[in-house]
Amino acid sequence: MHEVSVARELLSAVERHAGDAFARVRSVRVSVGSASGVAPRALEHAFRALSADGAMSAATLEIELVRARSRCFNCGAVFEFDGLIDACPGCGAFGGEILSGVELRLESIEVGDV
Amino acid sequence: MCDNCGCDVPAARIIEVGERLLADNRHAAEHNREHFARSRVIAVNLMGTPGAGKTALLEATISATRGKWRVAVIEGDQATRRDADRIRAVGAPSIQVETGLGCHLDAAQVHHALDHLSLEDADFVFIENVGNLVCPALFDLGEHLRTVVTSTAEGTDKPLKYAPMFRAADIVVLNKTDLLPHVPFDLPQWRGYLRGINPNARVCQTSATTGAGIAEWIVELASMRASHLQPSQRPA
């Protein structure tokens, strides 16, 4: 449910960066780490709901899901996974140091020219 | 008109941004941090499961440190002012934030709450978040310490199931240790799971009901407070 807060901040960031072109935004591209704790479908739903009646009602949200990378705390193997956590393929232990996959970033905004 | 082929679709341009989301929240959190620093107060974000005993832990902490620490509390719940009333009943100033449909506290809500709470007279401000092992993990409130309260009445595998929350913790409090003889909680396994998720988290085992472990939790808070109030003062 926190995706509503994330979507609200996303719209505010788009407005800040697009400036006068806010009403001509066609698409918004964000990257979401799989271990960030943000569910892409919930984020998309919240984005739709919050932008439905405004200047950005026609804009689409493109979410690039970034796979997480982790260093196993048990055997030190570095491995990639989808989701919040996964077992090490080498030793089967759960957990480790997250190297990437917790990012939440507004990457770019596409606006139509006048 | 499009630049490439002259068709009717208007040309578009890309604005490259590359900015982390939740900038507004970070901005408000930064304000809170300045406010805490100015008042020389240590802010503790108390997150955790509903029913883990967050408020009971605060009641025990306030009672055990009476006359030594001045404690203020911001209480976050979806509804009711019951927790703020409980805190006031043990003698500490408290303000309730009712989040309504909100599943977590954000930095702006804490900022507003600080307007109604005098920090000049406080050593610690505890911010009791909405009971929830998911959403609060994502929102910086400007706190010094992130504490997750969980209990032996829950499953042993909670750290694995709610990894982002346990990853975010500086201190993990395992409450309700008085129930250990009566529940199927596997303490060594739980510690192993937690170590895998967050090897750096300090662990406190408490029973807010019997008072067991409260002294160790207070020692932990005191040492965190000392390290935050006297940054890197080394003898020459």
Image (cartoon, grey):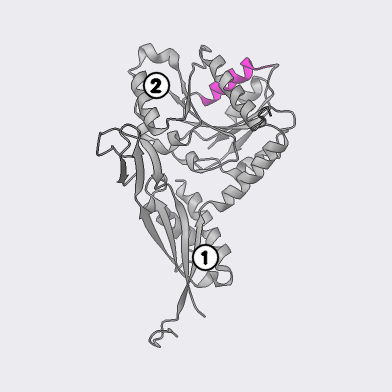
* Relative to B42, B149 lies left or right: left
Q: Residue furthest bottom?
A: B6
Image vertical order of residue B5 relative to residue B128, above or below? below
Between B43 and B75, the one lying in front of the other is B43
Q: Mark 1 — on which chain does it sit?
A: A
Letter of the chain that mark 2 sits on in the rendering: B
Neighbor class of circle 2 (other Cα within 10 Å; few <14, some 14-19, many 20+) is: some
Residue B2: percent from the left, percent from the top?
43, 83
Residue B132 drawn above or below residue A108: above
Q: Residue at x 49, y 43 (%)?
A: B138
The residue carrying mark 1 is A54
Tell me: B116 left or right of B82: right
Question: Start and end of the magenta stretch?
Answer: B54-66
Residue underneath mark 2? B153
Work out whether B192 lies above or below B79: above
Looking at the image, which residue is at 37% across and 19% down? B187
Where on the picture, by quarter, is residue B100? top right
Secondary structure state at the residue bearing disc 2: loop
Q: Amino acid at mark 2?
A: Ala
Tell me the residue at 75%/32% (across/down). B120
Quarter of image, res B234? top right
**Viewer-proximal residue among B79 and B71:** B71
Disc 1 from disc 2: Cα separation: 47 Å
Q: Which-is-in-front pick, marks 1 and 2?
A: 2
The verdict on residue B59 being magenta is yes
Q: Amino acid at mark 1?
A: Gly
Q: In the image shown, does B92 or A81 lie closer to the viewer? A: A81
